[in-house]
Image (cartoon, helix red, strand yellow):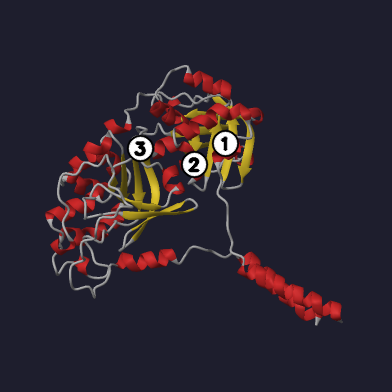
Amino acid sequence: MQLRSMAAMATVVLSLALLLLPHTTSAHNITHILAKYPQFSTFNHYLTETHLAAEINSRETITVCAVDNVGMAELLSKHLSIYTIKNVISLHVLLDYFGAKKLHQITNGTALAATMFQATGSAPGSTGFVNITDLKGGKVGFGPAENHGTLPATFVKSVEEIPYNISVIQISTMLPSASAEAPTPEPSQMNLTSLMSAHGCRVFAETLLKSPAEKTFDENADGGLTVFCPGDDAMKNFMPKFKNLTADGKQSLLEYHGVPVYQSMASLKSNNGVMNTLATDGAKKYDFVVQNDGDVVTLKTKIVTAKITGTLIDEQPIAIFTINKVLMPKELFKASAAADTPAPAPAPDADSPEPSKKKKKHKAPAAADTPADSPADGPSDDFADSTADDNSAFSYSAGPVVAGVLSMWVFFLLL
């Protein structure tokens, strides 16, 4: 009887532990996967050098067509710039899952797969797609769509598969593409607003073009610049508040979305803390807090919490990331409608030094510059959203719950 009671008690403890255990998942890491295979060391190296590895790791359904060191040597013999090499390798990253089994069961024997090269917007027309064809004799051929049916590469083997998440396969040779190998301008030579417009940030880009803030962004491009670009939906919803700001307020808000140093995604994921912006000007701090939780990076102001949702470019000296909300600084907006007086100007903070590279062209306005009847003076809808974001740090799966129920059932049987 005593033994039965002890077993019952152990069952209860186990069930409670399982019920309280949070469900976590570990994301794939392409460099860790390929590090186990020395024959792909060069390919792996350039995934890191071009920052493609971080982009691959951030996606949930993807296929990497790896090429061994011999194949990479042929590519490197062309002496392409690192930016062009990135385009070539991104053509080998398919935005769909193709495991070994699926490759041999392609509907109608052929498929056209979108690639990361196509997703960047750098590929003209349909040149960013790869033709995959199940050939006779069990072989599978690969070729850029621009090659009009020519399949220069074949499937060699499956390297590693995490079903419907990531598939790493080996193909026999690099995929030749005149478009991918075309000379690529360095990031500082690119038209930043055109790049943003082509990738879901058209409203922000057009607003920037009409503002003196554009000059501030351009002046920092060569020395280092990170831009957090709100998506079109977020920017459209924000425009009524933006239009009620003064001219200086509008400029400060746009510059608030730029940081005068290059911050890669890897750097943002590994560092938490206060970050100054292009709008930072002495007592007008115009800063925000960067926080990360695994692969999720958030930017927190006193008013709103925005999440990084994508990468447009991440090449020194420029990084442009998309965010799901407009960043609202406390210098321009109030967190509570109960605050009838302008927000006091904060004292200089020795712990948040102004970046030495920052080039400031105007004096940032105080919160009082915002009209009294502006929507900015009321509580922000985004402020409530940020609270919800903060409360969603954990998720629970059904597995522990089921295990707990079964354990309790065993407990009653033992009584």
- Can you identify the residue that label 3 sits on? 121
User: What is the three-letter code of the residue carrying label 2?
Assistant: Ile
Q: What kind of element bears circle 3?
A: loop
Q: Select label 2 or label 1 by which is in front.
A: 2
Looking at the figure, which quarter contains the N terminus? Answer: bottom right
| Residue nearest the viewer, comparing 99 with 235 | 235
- Residue 109 is marked as 1
- Disc 2 and disc 3: Cα gap in Å? 17 Å
The vertical placement of 406 against 35, above or below, is below
Q: Where is residue 350 in the image (x, y as percent from the top left)?
A: 30, 52
Residue 36's disc number: none
Look at label 1 and name its amino acid: Gly
What is the C-alpha distance between the residues marked 1 and 3? 28 Å
Q: Residue at x 58, y 55 (%)?
A: 25
Identify the residue shown where x is 15% and y is 61%.
Answer: 244
Position in image of residue 76 (x %, y %): 48, 20
* For discs 1 and 3, the disc positioned in front in the rendered view: 3
Categorize mark 2 by other alpha carbons within 10 Å: few (<14), some (14-19), many (20+): many
Confirm whether residue 180 shows in the render.
no
The residue tagged 2 is 56
Q: Earlier in the sequence, mark 2 or mark 1?
A: 2
Q: Name the element at disc 2.
A: helix
For marks 1 and 3, the one nearer the N-term is 1
Q: Considering depth in this image, is 271 or 250 the residue closer to the camera? A: 271
